[in-house]
Amino acid sequence: MKNDADLRAGFLAAFAAYSIWGVLPLYLKLVSFAGPWEVLCARILWSIPAAFVAVQFMGGFAETRTALAQKGVLRALAFSSVFIAINWAIYVWAVANNHVIEASLAYFLTPLVNVAFGVTLFKERITKAQTGALALAAIGIAVQAAALGAFPWVAIALCASWSLYGLVRKQAPVPAAGGLLAETLILAAPSALGLWWVSTTAQGITFDDSPSNALLLAASGLATAIPLILFSFGARRLKFSTLGMLQFLAPSIQFFIGWAYGEPLTPLRIASFALIWIGLAIFTADNLWRERQRAALSS
């Protein structure tokens, strides 16, 4: 039984993790002096030492080595590294091109897409409430497309890449920090080649233009590892339902950041988010009710 201090510490850690993920667009705006490809490659490469320290901080390498030795784990991490690289690349591009509100939509949709994956890929049963939530989300996407005058590919691509990343990572039982270290090591060579390619373009590499540029780009490793450590600490101490409620904090912050930066928020676009938020409210209420039912039956 976890005591109150443990639960409080877990809640604060998870809250801080989702808050950091929420304000990530502000950091990416700070490094807008660099092109999206340089930011992406720098984030991957600077995440390697940060992930190395995180593994040490979160219990050492013994558990990671054991996990990596299992059959199929490295293959799964190779696939997950591709999905996380795609997700980071699209997100960096989205922030640089003022699509933060559309990017936030992706992470509101993720819980519902995970349910859809469970039904289509694993033949999981779906409740009437979940069906209704998915239907509202689908209508919301259609309304968002009408509001944008085009298919919301940024939101859908971010949501799909993140959901596929989570799906593959479930097949690789590796600790969070150890998995990140393995994934970034897999991506290290392509990232180094990517930086070399950027150096040959007209813009070139901005890392060595000034000490402040270097420090800001190097901080991308900390921006990746710190919330991961906080989330892992919190997840071990909190109920799944509490984490489920907190996960909406990050896209909510991102939504308001996009709005504050003057991204268009038309009535039609507000209507699309309202439909998705109503769907999420139904989905969350259904999950909470079912968890209470299970708790009542087991007591």
Image: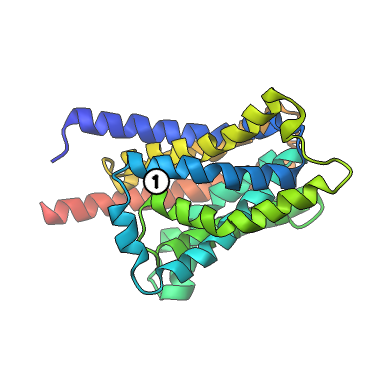
Left/right of residue 244 with respect to residue 27 in the rendered view: left
Where residue 112 appears, as percent x and y from the top left, is 50, 57
Please name the residue shown 34% across and 56% down the image.
64
> Looking at the image, which is closer to me, 106 or 138?
106
Locate residue 3, reporting x and y percent: 16, 33
Q: Amino acid at mark 1?
A: Gly
Question: Is residue 111 left or right of 36 when viewed as pictured?
Answer: left
Residue at 29 percent of width and 55 percent of height: 63
Location of residue 182 in the rendering, given as x and y in whole percent from the top left corner: 47, 56
The answer to whether 270 appears left or right of 44 in the picture is right
Q: Nearer the viewer, residue 138 or 213?
A: 213
Q: Position of residue 174 (x, y in %)?
A: 36, 58
User: In which image quadrant can residue 264 be found?
Assistant: top right
The 10 Å Cα crowd at callout 1, few under 14, some 14 to 19, many 20 or more, is some
Which of 119 and 156 lies nearest the eye of the viewer? 156
Element on which disc 1 rests: helix
Front residue of this view, candidates 296 and 208: 208
Taking the image as drawn, is residue 42 in sight? Answer: yes
Residue 141 position (above or below residue 247): below
Residue at image location 52% in from the left, 62% down from the top: 80
Q: Residue at x 74, y 54 (%)?
A: 145
Q: Quadrant of the N terminus?
A: top left
Query: Is 245 above or below relative to 118?
Result: above
In the shown orientation, is residue 10 left or right of residue 223? left
Residue extending farthest right: 202
Q: Which residue is mark 1?
A: 244
